[in-house]
Amino acid sequence: MAKRVGIVDVAMTPGEETKDNFLDQVFKVTKEVLDKAGISREDVGTVISASSDVFHSGQSCANAYYWDAGAAMLKNGSRQDGESLFAFIYAVMRILSGSYDTALVLGVCKGSENPENDMITHFYTDPFYQRPIGINETIAAALQKRQYMERYGITDEQCAKVVVKNLGNGLRNPYAHVKKRLSVDDVLSSEYVMSPLHKLECAPKSEGFIAMLLASEDKAKKLTDKPVWLKGYGSSLDSFYLGDRDLLKGELKNAAKQAYAQAGIENPAKTIDMAEICEPYAFQELLWCEDLGFCKQGGGGKLIDKGVTEMDGELPVNPSGGVLATNPYVSRGLYRLAECFLQIRGQAGERQLDKKVKTALAHGTHGFAGQCHAVAIIGV
Amino acid sequence: MGKKVAIVGSGQTMHGRRFDLAYPELVNEAIESCLINTGVDAKDLDGVVFGTMPSMMEGVALTHFYFADVLRAKGKPILKTETCGSTGVSLAITAYYWIASGMADLLMVVGSEKMNEGDAQATMTTILEPFYQMYFIAGAPGVFSMQSQEWSVRFGIPEEKVRDAATRLSIDHHNDAFGNPYAHIKQRLTPEQVNTARIITYPVRLWDVCPTSDGACAMIFASEKMAKKLGKKAAWVKGVGYSGEEYWFGDSDKVMWQSAIQAAKQAYDMAGIKNPRKELDVAEVYNPFTFQELLYYECFGFCDFGQACDLTLKGMFSKDGELPCDPSGGTLCTNPIGATGLIRVAEAAMQVTGQAGDHQIPGAKQALAHAMGGVDQYNGVMILGAK
């Protein structure tokens, strides 16, 4: 990228339900990130938030509600729907355009006030063909997992290891919603939600309010001693109907290719020090690792068997506990990016990796079987 | 400042009650027309910007999934911008920043709504929180009638004069719509018809209100380099402005309406406009209600506060007036909400490139496009120029 955009700081809420209402939580993370950066509301150039009408406590035109709580009063701002990494990159664009030198990015989702995620994802379906079948994101994921197991011989045990790893990592993360020390047997003996997916292989429904402050290169250097820079971004959308797609050859490869090209990364498995991957279903972490080029196609099972993605592995994945631990649907991409940021800064507390993190990858996905992917690479 | 951003062209659906098409087909109608008009090959697009009003208007959520193929977005980056009624202008602003940042050279921008598949007023009522406001601000007309009454009382404008000015706008716009092949409602009206039409929410009567429309609009935005390569006569983005205020309706002044004033000011400052009435040749003001259009003339500095009625009655804002407003018939005649703001931008672009056909304002060089959203909470403005 010609000019650089830096992340100045971040603030977020834990995934559990709290007594704070919606607006209080938006205000809290907004205030916290501005305090950390030592600036006031008046200093914020523009505010871009991510929220979705359907994941928004029964209110539509989502950003109307929290506009003023999120420091946007009489500012030029906007909103992205569905994926919070969209809001991040839109804020980056606004800075790169030269119009603003600071941008506040918000991800907003109060899971506790929403119905079950799958009741909502069911409304992604078209009213003619898919709606009458009752399909939702978990059913789409079950089809995808079945195909993954059959085509590449991925086992239930390998998928369960992802859960054991991620919920175990969550034990050290104060922001994690579900934290558990589990065995592979525990995961596989949890009931089927939708065969072949066991309950513990599926992400929960969480709260998630997050605020991230971005700045142009000059401004970032003024606001913090330790800016973290955006190195590359890519995103890609797939076809709508599941039957039109090869669910194991999705668009993540394409999104990653764009991001790697911008960041000048040729060998991601070597260059990337850690990754936060959006895995609402355990097997997806393995599949996405393949698409991101961390191993060869079909090699996701071996990757976890060898311990490569463990906290002390060569390429730790989801030290935060990932989406399996905390799933604020719309905000989850930005939570991935926040963890990468904290790891690079050495501010990840008890879950700080025991190695120098210089380059990190954050991934977000939403839609059936990963219909849309976004990848951001940040580093020092 | 950022890189220069051009608008290469647009496509619209025949807006109206489109029970002949499913929603993706409706969106496709605008996109096909846009690609034919601009000669752009969808394969060359660097990305797509898409948005609608509340996702649940038609009972399908996160519609970028459903429309992925129709949007020609497979394998491409997408941004899904949504800001209530102002979505259309927010979409255009998103495309502006995407290209101005240098991250793309060629984008397609699409806004759509198929309102006849749902209950628009019921959907809009869910913008309000369920504790205080939802019970008494049901739907859109109530909000706008409160606003217009506050305005006329504040400036001591006699009720009859406000009525006369609103009637003039209603007659003019419904008449102008005959010149716009895409418009939904076209009607020759007499003052008596407008003044005696049934009351929706006092003082708003039937012909003061926009219809419920199905429609879509698609536009191509390009970098300077790409616009030259495409070789079409382009409109150029000269200024963008957007502002939002308090969520709670009673917390802000809706007469000296800061979000509207600020959005216009940002766009004027960027475009170097000091006297909008003189420097603008045409304006596509978001006018779902006649009364609100009058207020916008004042907030946008087309005239002083309290003056809009007198000047409207003198013909200042008519098609042959000093600053023609909504020669397309505007939102008053066509309102597929998620597309409406983008249609304003498309119309402004057609005007400054001399491609507006029967509703062309001769010699238009600089135009304003505007949209409003939320419960009178958001305003977005874009200024386009011929150079």
Image: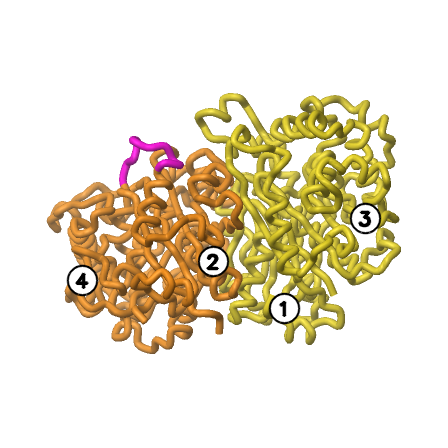
Chain colours: A yellow, B orange
Image mark count? 4
Magenta stretch, residue numbers: B16-25
The residue positioned 65% from the left and 48% from the top of the image is: A333
Q: How far separated are the C-alphas under marks 1 and 4? A: 48 Å
Q: Amino acid at mark 2?
A: Thr
Secondary structure character of the magenta stretch overall: loop
> Mark 4 falls on what kind of element?
loop
Residue B119 inside the magenta-drawn segment: no
Point out the image quarter for the N terminus of chain A: bottom right
Q: How far separated are the C-alphas under marks 4 and 3? A: 66 Å
Q: Are marks 1 and 4 on the same chain?
A: no
The local crowd at label 1, few if under 14, some if 14 to 19, many if 20 or more residues have their Cα within 10 Å, is some
Contact between marks 1 and 3 (CB within 8 A): the answer is no
Q: Amino acid at mark 3?
A: Pro
Point out the image quarter for the C terminus of chain A: bottom right
Q: Chain of mark 1?
A: A
The local crowd at label 3, few if under 14, some if 14 to 19, many if 20 or more residues have their Cα within 10 Å, is some
Work out whether residue A161 or residue A114 is closer to the camera in this orientation and state it: A161
Residue occupied by mark 4 = B318
Residue occupied by mark 1 = A4
